[in-house]
Image (cartoon, rainbow, N blue to C red):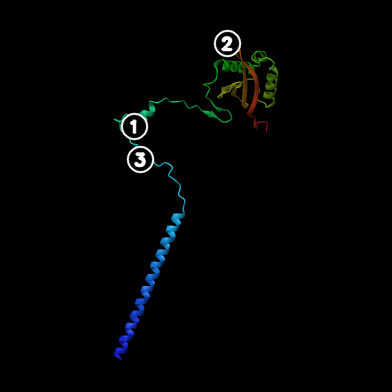
């Protein structure tokens, strides 16, 4: 009886050992399969080339425009920026754009100023002298449009916007203000030379935007 029990025990242990070995073999096989799949996937991917291959090899602790004797810290860079030419920043108004008039010819600005002063003083005869030859109709239409939108010609103040200058085009935006609202006008200037002097005349005047009495752009 003892012998029989011993034989049964040995067979049971062998069976357990065989199962463990089989499971281990299957586990190793599964791991090998996953590694192979991963390897195959990696080999099949077309990786892009380096965009800046030498970027990480650059020496960035020096700057060619700053002496090597100075440390590269925020204070040094602030001093460096302060020594560079600084460009002005001009305000902008919606509808008229930048108020940078550095490119506006002083003679042309003077003509527009005189025109505006005469127009809002109801001195139409003075305005006529500032119109280019054959362009008086533009003054008549402008006067009509100002009255039509209800802006009025009794009084106003104005500011210039940044001019648009091309080979044959000189446009100057002007915004008018009075108690009735605002009116944005584009002046088209013509240039002629007399006795080696530039003479500016107004070629056309166009209202392109307005806010008057609750109305805007004719709506």
| Disc on res. 75 | 1
Q: Can you say which quadrant of the picture contains the C terminus?
A: top right
Number of other residues with Cα within 10 Å of mark 3, as a class: few under 14, some 14 to 19, many 20 or more: few
From this view, report whether residue 96 is shown above or below residue 201.
below
The answer to whether 181 is drawn above or below residue 5 in the figure is above
> Callout 2: helix, strand or loop?
strand
Marks 1,2: beta carbons within 8 A: no
Position in image of residue 20 (x %, y %): 36, 74
Provide residue 211's location: percent of width, then percent of height.
63, 30
- Label placed on residue 57: 3
Residue 153 visible at all: no
Residue 1 screen position, x and y as percent: 30, 91
Residue 120 relative to residue 1: left or right = right
Distance in Å between CA atoms under marks 2 and 3:
61 Å
Mark earlier in primary sequence (1, 2): 1
Disc 1 is placed on an element classified as helix
Instruction: Pinpoint residue 89: horizontal percent, then vertical percent.
Output: 48, 27
Quick one: 187 or 11, which is closer to the camera? Answer: 11
Mark on residue 197? 2
Q: Looking at the rendering, which quadrant does residue 85 occupy? A: top left
User: Do the residues bearing badges 1 and 3 touch, measured as CB atoms within 8 Å?
Assistant: no
| Residue plotted at (53% across, 29% down) | 92
- Callout 2 environment at 10 Å: few (<14), some (14 to 19), or many (20+)? few
């Amino acid at each position: 009886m003892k012998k029989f029990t011993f034989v049964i025990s040995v067979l049971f242990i062998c069976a357990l050992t065989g199962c463990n070995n089989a499971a281990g073999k299957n586990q190793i096989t599964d791991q090998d399969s996953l590694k192979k799949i991963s390897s195959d996937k990696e080999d099949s991917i077309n990786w892009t080339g380096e965009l800046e291959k030498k970027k990480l090899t650059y020496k960035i602790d020096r700057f060619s425009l700053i002496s090597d004797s100075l440390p590269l810290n925020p204070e040094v860079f602030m001093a460096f920026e302060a020594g560079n030419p600084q460009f002005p920043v001009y305000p902008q108004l919606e509808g008229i754009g930048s108020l940078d008039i550095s490119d506006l010819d002083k003679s042309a600005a003077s003509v527009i100023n005189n025109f505006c002063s005469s127009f809002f003083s109801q001195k139409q005869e003075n305005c006529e002298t500032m119109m280019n030859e054959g362009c008086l109709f533009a003054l008549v239409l402008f006067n009509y449009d100002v009255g039509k939108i209800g802006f009025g010609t009794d009084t106003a103040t104005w500011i210039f916007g940044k001019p648009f200058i091309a080979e044959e085009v000189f446009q100057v935006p002007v915004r008018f203000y009075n108690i009735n609202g605002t009116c944005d006008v584009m002046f088209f200037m013509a240039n002629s030379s007399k006795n080696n002097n530039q003479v500016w005349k107004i070629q056309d005047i166009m209202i392109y935007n307005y806010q008057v009495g609750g109305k805007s752009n004719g709506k």
